[in-house]
Image (cartoon, rainbow, N blue to C red):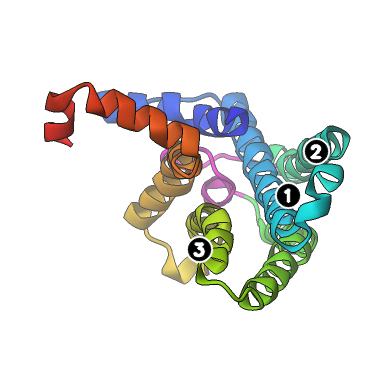
Amino acid sequence: SFLDVCYSSVTLPNMLKIFITDKTTISFNGCIAQMCFILLTGCTEIFMLSAMAYDRYAAICHPLHYATTMNIQFCSQLVGGAWSISLFYSLVNTVPVSYLHFCGPNHVSGFSCEFPSLLDLSCMKTLLNEKWFITSAAILGLIAFPPPTVISYIHIISTTLRIRSVEGRRKAFSTCSSHLIVVTLYYGTALFRYLRPNSASSVVLDRMLSIQYGILTPMLNPVIYSLKNKEVKAALRRILGGKSHICHVI
């Protein structure tokens, strides 16, 4: 929840200014700082989703050892490692961009200073920056996505299929469904935004994708996860049950 607040807060204030005044300004240093924090929080989100995939694997495949495996110390190491690696990834991509010359157009096409938008405004050749970004993103992807997420879900699916009872399979799927929804929303839009060729670029589409993974996904995460919690659902029923007019509106 803290990460989602940080992630959306990086871009939301300026975005609201654009919606209200139809335009806003940002300094060069502010733009670079915003890009740095976008990469930091976005990368941390990837590692946190991977850690949560491993959490699902431990809960379904090794339920008797879950409390020992996912202890406080191990979870703290996962969170600390996610922020530390993401900070390094953000700096190695932000610092080279800060040395580029921007002597031409100064109008960012999207709602925020993202990496592709800044490269489009540079007067210098940005091929090295693009190659370095793709290389670092590929290394990051190999570390963060396939091992914890894909391999975890391969084991989860294999274990779920071996469960004989329908109720057992339903519970196992229910444990993973919210995480799968968030992973699909986040990875799908972010990968399409950053890795598609320039020939497929569209200002309107870029803005829609930025809103999707920058605001909508962090906003939906608490809703998607908390509605799977029995206590939250019971509290929601009590609130709505005592207010018939709200129930009618819903």
Residue 22 vs 103, above or below: the answer is above
Of marks 3 and 1, which one's residue comes earlier in the chain?
1
Q: Amino acid at mark 1?
A: Ala
Q: Kindly identify which residue carries mark 1.
A: 51
Of marks 3 and 2, which one's residue comes earlier in the chain?
2
Within the image, what quadrant is residue 71 found in?
top right
Q: Residue at x 75, y 42 (%)?
A: 86
Q: Is residue 93 visible?
A: yes
Q: Residue at x 62, y 43 (%)?
A: 42
Within the image, what quadrant is residue 126 found in?
bottom right
Residue 49 vs 137, above or below: the answer is above
SS type, badge 3: helix
Circle 1 packing at 10 Å, graded few (<14), some (14-19), many (20+), is many
Circle 2 packing at 10 Å, graded few (<14), some (14-19), many (20+), is some
Within the image, what quadrant is residue 216 found in?
top left
Please report contact status of discs 1 and 2: CB closer than 8 Å, yes or no: yes
Q: Amino acid at mark 3?
A: Phe
Q: Amino acid at mark 2?
A: Cys
Which region is colored magenta?
100-123
SS type, badge 1: helix
Q: Kindly identify which residue carries mark 2.
A: 75
Q: Residue at x 73, y 41 (%)?
A: 90
Q: Main secondary structure of the magenta part?
A: loop
Residue 74 vs 207, above or below: the answer is above
Circle 3 packing at 10 Å, graded few (<14), some (14-19), many (20+), is few
Q: Tell whether position 234 is magenta.
A: no
